[in-house]
Amino acid sequence: MGKLAGKVAIITGASRGIGRTVALTLARAGADIVIAAKSETEAPNLPGTIHSVAKEVEALGRRALPVKVDVRDDAAIAEMVAQTMKKFGRIDILVNNAGALWWQPVLGTPMKRYDLINGINSRAAFSCTQAVLPHMIAGGFGHILVYSPPIDLSALPGKVAYCISKFGMTMLAHGLAGEMVGKPISINALWPVTAIESFATINFQLGDPTIWRKAEILADATQSIVETEPGKLTGQALLDEDYLRSTGVTEFVKYRCDPNSEPPRLFAKDLPQAGLVPAKL
């Protein structure tokens, strides 16, 4: 059944893209999955719903719980946790994947957009983490991941609001790890070193397959992290390739979107400018 047999993982933004890939990867490792996202119906450029991913998880032999959640709504998050505890009786893993993009300078950032990205990114990660934490402590096992980058001040110009929202998630990982010292709870930040193929990169033409890697690299890194003993690896801002190399992985060609092109390492400061992209990462 895999190392995660008997564990329960909540994944936000799991109706498509990176979140879906992570959900299926953890299911193959034995975990039961809570698919937490807003999408109950498909859109032409955004296929996939919480229900379609739930069926995929169940086809892998694992239990699934699709829950419609707006991660900006604390009551919806509380209901997600309540439903998870009612169905599974435990919460072992939380992956804060839901996210929104806005790569514009300060003068090009209306406050409603600032509130949107911070609500979906840093605030939602904080709220979801706060909601699951008591159950993890009571259960004696917890892995929390936020998908956010190491704090790099050179990335700020042109993306100040976005970086505030993402660096806030990373600060959550650093800070909560200190609060959980001595407890079997881990929290880490994880970020790709290359652009990742997703509906955001595709629909808004953020590069092309020659510079993208498949979402599986983030999913494999996620699986490896949450399979470690809680409390052993915590409070880190990890990069997917570098972390996987530290575990002995040496083959990365399989993650290329273009088999003939090795994507360059990119960080937030290197990514192209874009307009409004209120999409899941």
Image (tube, helix red, strand yellow):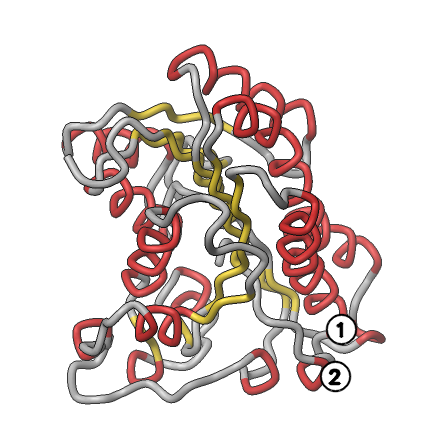
Q: Quadrant of residue 163?
A: bottom right
Q: Is residue 225 above or below residue 74?
A: below
Q: Which mark is residue 257?
A: none
Name the spot of residue 166 as percent of width and height, x first. 65, 62
Residue at image position (54%, 82%) is: 271
Viewed as shown, does residue 112 lie left or right of 277? Answer: right
Check disc 1: other Cα within 10 Å, few if <14, some if 14-19, many if 20+. some
Which amino acid type corresponds to the residue marked 2 in the rendered image?
Answer: Pro
Name the spot of residue 47 as percent of width and height, x first. 33, 46
Q: Is residue 56 above or below residue 239?
A: above
Residue marked by disc 1: 160
Task: Name the foreground residue: 42 vs 179.
Answer: 179
Name the spot of residue 279 as percent of width and height, x first. 53, 55
Quarter the N terminus occupies: top left
Q: Quadrant of residue 252?
A: bottom left
Task: Name the foreground residue: 253 vs 44.
Answer: 253
Viewed as shown, does residue 56 lie left or right of 266? Answer: left
Name the spot of residue 122 as percent of width and height, x first. 68, 52
Q: Is residue 19 above or below residue 90?
A: below
Q: Mark 1 falls on what kind of element?
A: helix
* Distance CA(mark 1)–CA(mark 2): 6 Å
Residue at image position (71%, 46%) is: 123
Residue marked by disc 2: 157
Q: Is residue 59 above or below residue 122?
A: above
Which amino acid type corresponds to the residue marked 1 in the rendered image?
Answer: Val
Viewed as shown, does residue 204 lie left or right of 113? Answer: left
Check disc 2: other Cα within 10 Å, few if <14, some if 14-19, many if 20+. some
Q: Are marks 1 and 2 in contact (CB under 8 Å)?
A: yes
Name, please, the residue furthest toward the top.
86
